[in-house]
Image (cartoon, rainbow, N blue to C red):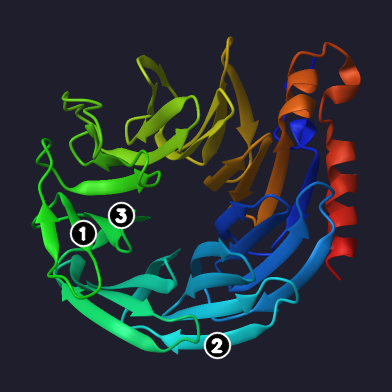
Amino acid sequence: MSELSLEAISSYVRDLSSACSAVILTENFLFAGSHDGLLICWEAAEGIERWRVSIDGPISDIYFDSDKLYVTASASLYAIDNQRGSIVWSNKLEGASDYVIVVDGSVWATSSIYELEVADFIESSIWRFDYSGNELDRWVISERPWHLASDGDGGILLGLGRPRCGYLRVRPGVDLQHIPLSIESPITCGAGDIENILFGHSNGGVSSILSKISEHEHESLVTAIAVGKSGWISGHDDGKVSMESNASYLPGSIDSVEILETIGWASSYNDSRVNVMILSDEEKTLTHDSRIRQMHSLGNYLALGDDKGRIFMIELEVLQRRINSSYQAVADDSKKSDLRAKLRMLRNR
């Protein structure tokens, strides 16, 4: 049987036209944003487009909250009606936008300033707005945040890089609280919410606010981390993929990781070659033609976005049937791939 491609195991593929920079799944919808600022909403089950809107890109983060979608892009924060795709309000942020989250009626966002002369982030801002877009608070810190989550008490938690490292608790009307971690190394990524927040560090360690995950210091920094119902998965700069106590390797550096139910996913990039690993009872590796930097799962669905702007929807039942199948029709021959690409181009016109 021919080697399976990512497209061959996908239920459907959609296009953003430029590199995917953010993707999230909700119970009914799939939202994806591009480097050029295109934001599209599809029905998750069928891939039917509901709306699209263009804003100043790149889009950096998306947060779904009942009737609105909150999006950080370029140097702004947007509130978008998630039924029609219309912009309700927007606010300029200082520097490049990072993350956004809604906590107890407040919209929180972060932005950072990068200094080319020192090749590092020199300042970041933490913003709090109300639902109408009115600015309520702003704090300025010297670290770049690498994860944003609710603290479960009306505030937020931020995983920090240099110089302080550790994490920061921010709440309205209360002084900022810096909390060190047992691993004294800059945070490079984070995942999860207040029930299970994990941080990846530049020394390769993984730490948790609620419980001790790892004391070891792997020699390669953590480039991606994800939390699922069945545990957690981390990817490293040297190609290492850790899922609980198990470890595997892919060529190059890990771009993204995710967990679909109990199945781990990881994508790596090495000298223009992209590999996608599926970690289940038996590891499977797929080749792909473009870097996959974005993954998000919910329930039985997994969405992946690549640098060509394609969004691949994986359904657990379809995935298991296709990767276990031995018939040739599942193989992704070039003619079928070309035909699917032409159909997507027609759909996007």
Identify the residue position indicated by label 3 in the image.
Answer: 151
Secondary structure beneath label 2:
strand
What residue is drawn where x is 33% and y is 63%? 154
Answer with mark 1 or mark 2, whichever residue precedes in sequence. Answer: 2
Circle on res. 89: 2
Residue 84 in percent (x, y) is at 75, 77
SS assignment at label 1: strand
| Residue 213, horizontal then vertical, whole percent | 25, 27
**Element under label 3?**
loop
Q: Determine whether label 3 and label 1 are within 8 Å by CB.
A: yes
In-image side of 311 versus 142 (left or right): right
- In this rendering, is residue 234 above or below 186? above
Write down the residue under mark 1.
169
Label whose residue precedes the other's in the sequence (2 or 3): 2
In this view, the residue in front, 48 or 217, is 48
Select label 2 or label 3 by which is in front. Answer: 3
Tell me which amino acid carries mark 3: Asp
Label 1: few (<14), some (14–19) or many (≥20) C-alpha neighbours in 10 Å: some
How many residues crowd mark 2 within 10 Å: few (<14), some (14–19), many (20+)? some
The image quarter in which residue 96 lies = bottom left
